[in-house]
Image (spheres, coloured by chain):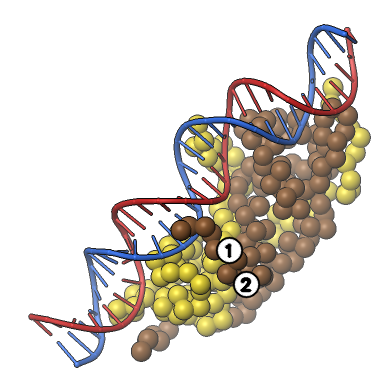
Chain colours: A brown, B yellow, C red, D blue
DNA sequence: TTTCTTTATCGTATCTTTACGATAAATATA
DNA sequence: TATATTTATCGTAAAGATACGATAAAGAAA
């Protein structure tokens, strides 16, 4: 039964949750930070910066690429990664939109005594 | 082996990825939006608004509560949920910090020809 | 008190994620 | 050509997430 009924939700919510999922592991956040700091990175440099094995780093990089947040090009025998700035700012805008919606909508901080019939 | 070596990453990255994980499912985003729109909600209203079973909604609500984004109080036989505005804006600030860091750090959009020795 | 309503939790099945070693593929170097 | 370097992918194991029915718990209503 549990087939993740993602299809039945709104497109907006699905989009947003997909972005969020890309950030939902410390290794991936760390990778993004590393890429920003060094501007561009050969894969091995990322591996050296993280406490996990090379194969696992490759896997996380693949997810970030699938999410569109990172671009990679082959560079001789190694491969070079960098941030996709456009996607990052798109994600930032999307999340800010959500937070605005949440802040605007909710005026109280406690629950009303509204009851159900 | 795969014990999720979350402990070995930076505190900041762990914190952020935990927030992100809370948003990493369309149902949870939808719940937050619903709470914002209606200001406060009895659980049943959320169940009616979503295409998933009551037990599953309760499970998602629990995760949002654990993440601190949502508060719940018992209201007679039912329970009433609302957003934790303080936590939401804290999360927003944290994410904005990350995005600034990413935008500031990365000046190029393509990979340099830097090579590894 | 008995019954109904509402929600949380339990048990369970299935899919997904995380992690790593081993290996393949591609390129550089000797 | 043979060897070393670098990275992606495969196979696999374990943990986690997702989903739901059934049931328990707590109060309201009859």
Q: CA distance from mark 1 to mark 2?
A: 9 Å
For the point 67% across and 30% down, the residue is A54
Residue A105: give x, y in percent of width and height: 59, 80
Q: Position of residue B57 (x, y in %)?
A: 45, 68
Q: Is D9 left or right of C9, judged from the image as shown?
A: right
Query: Helix, strand or loop at disc 2?
Result: loop
**Is residue B91 something one can see in this rendering?**
no
Q: Residue at x 41, y 70 (%)?
A: B54
Viewer-nearest residue: A74 or A27 = A74
Residue A117 to residue B64: above or below: below
Determine the residue positioned at 85% across, 40% down.
A73
Q: Nearer the viewer, residue C26 or A104?
A: C26
Please give the residue where the numbered disc 1 appears in the rendered image. A6
Q: Is residue B63 above or below residue B17?
A: below
Q: Nearer the viewer, residue B114 or A37?
A: B114
Dividing the picture into quarters, in which one does residue B10 lie?
top right
Q: Name which quarter of the figure residue A35 lies in.
A: top right
Residue position for label 2: A10
Q: Residue at x 60, y 66 (%)?
A: A7
Position of the C terminus of chain B, as image quadrant, is top right
How crowded is the residue under tag 2: few (<14 C-alpha within 10 Å), some, or many (20+)? few
Category of crowding for the residue at label 1, using alpha-carbon neighbours closer than 10 angstroms: few (below 14), some (14–19), many (at least 20): some
The front one of A96 and B26 is B26
Secondary structure under tag 1 reads helix
- Answer left or right for A95 relative to A117: right
């Amino acid at each position: 039964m549990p087939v993740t009924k993602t299809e039945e939700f709104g497109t907006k919510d699905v989009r947003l949750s997909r972005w969020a999922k890309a950030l939902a592991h410390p290794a991936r956040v760390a990778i993004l930070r590393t890429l920003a700091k060094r501007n561009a990175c050969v894969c091995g440099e990322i591996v050296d910066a993280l406490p996990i094995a090379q194969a696992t780093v490759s896997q996380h990089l693949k997810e970030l690429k699938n999410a569109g947040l990172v671009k990679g090009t082959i560079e001789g025998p190694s491969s070079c990664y960098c941030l996709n700035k456009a996607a990052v700012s798109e994600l930032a805008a999307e999340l800010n939109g959500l937070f605005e919606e949440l802040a605007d909508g909710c005026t109280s901080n406690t629950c009303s005594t509204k009851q159900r019939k």
